Amino acid sequence: MTLTPDQLCATNFSYLRCTLDRWLDDMAELEVEHVELWGVSPHLYVDDTTSRQVDAIRRKLTERELNLTCFCPEQVMYPVNIAAADPTLRDRSIAYFHRCAEVAAQLGAPILFCTSGWNTLDEDPAQAWERSRDALASIAERADQLGLTCVLEALQPVESHIVTTSADIARMREEIGAPNLEVALDTGAMVAAGETILDYTSKGDLAHVHFVDGAPTGHLAWGDGDRPLATWLQDLADADYTGFLSLETIADRYWLDPLPPVRQSFERITAAMREAERTTPAP
């Protein structure tokens, strides 16, 4: 099989200095079908958003015929850490994710995006692992009650030392045992860990991919880095991946003019997909 352009998913990650309406209008102009929403201010930070405002955002998506594939709450830059040793911060972070699950369901997003949280460098990482595991189990349970799938992404070592590899994701999922907790692949974290697409696809239940270029890490538009686009697309196709490729482009070089990198990525990936389809032998 080959991957197809209808598996591409735009995001608001490069629109941090723009309004939500600007992003939505740009995506409609590009005739994008699928989007992932990053839950940040000024777009949608759940602790500052009312139920009425969430309903208004869902209407805006519907009016532009945009399908929301995933809700990705901010959980690295903001004071949110489900693995925190401070019980006040951890309890508040878990409550925040429960609210995020409710917002995702209200928006009609089938997937809630999760990471492990992080540990301080001068503490026992095993204790942080246990705190993260128990928190993720609680979040997955609340998401399941709402009919949502959770996906767990590895972070880079500069962000966390808890879940940083595909093996860590597999271990965490096994310990939690939640049927609605599946795998997210982030190509930046994958490269940072020295892993490959196969390391992820071989472990099963790959449900979502943050698919970006880099040099070699980073979250760049395709064509701005040096990653092997055609090879990675083929690796995912060989694994019969049927989910979305979400374009998590986020770099300050894009903030003042965020539309061109989105367009560039769509054009580069679509061209690579069409070339793969052209050169794939008929069955």
Image: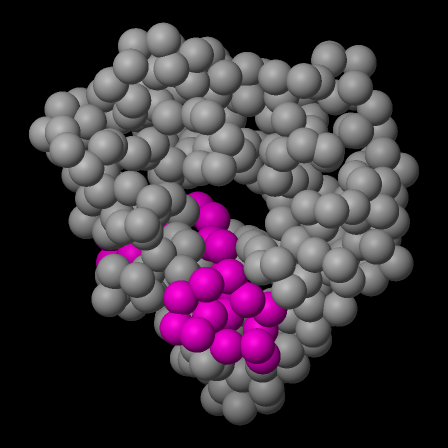
Residue 212 appears at what percent x and percent y? 51, 64
Q: Is residue 139 above or below residue 62?
A: above
| Foreground of the two, 91 or 187 | 91
Q: Is residue 189 above or below residue 120?
A: below
Residue interval drawn in magenta: 200-225
Q: What residue lies at 88% left-to-right and 58% top-to-bottom?
A: 29
Q: Image quarter for residue 102?
A: top right
Q: Is residue 266 visible?
A: no
Q: Is residue 69 visible?
A: yes
Name the side, left or right, on which 149 lies relative to 246.
left
Is residue 214 located in the magenta-colored stretch of the structure? yes
Q: What residue lies at 36% left-to-right and 9% top-to-bottom?
A: 88
| Foreground of the two, 35 or 280 | 35
Q: What residue lies at 79% left-to-right and 39% top-to-bottom?
A: 20
Figure coloring: one colour
| Foreground of the two, 23 or 106 | 23
Residue 89 appears at what percent x and percent y? 38, 15
**Count of picture labels:** 0
Q: Image quarter for residue 10?
A: bottom right
Residue 242 appears at what percent x and percent y? 50, 56
| Foreground of the two, 95 or 236 | 95
Name the side, left or right, on which 7 lies relative to 120.
right
Name the side, left or right, on which 154 lies relative to 54.
left
Q: What residue lies at 19% left-to-right and 49% top-to-bottom?
A: 167
Q: Is residue 61 above or below residue 12?
A: above
Question: Principal SS element in the magenta part?
Answer: loop
Is residue 260 located in the magenta-colored stretch of the structure? no
Residue 129 appears at what percent x and percent y? 18, 29
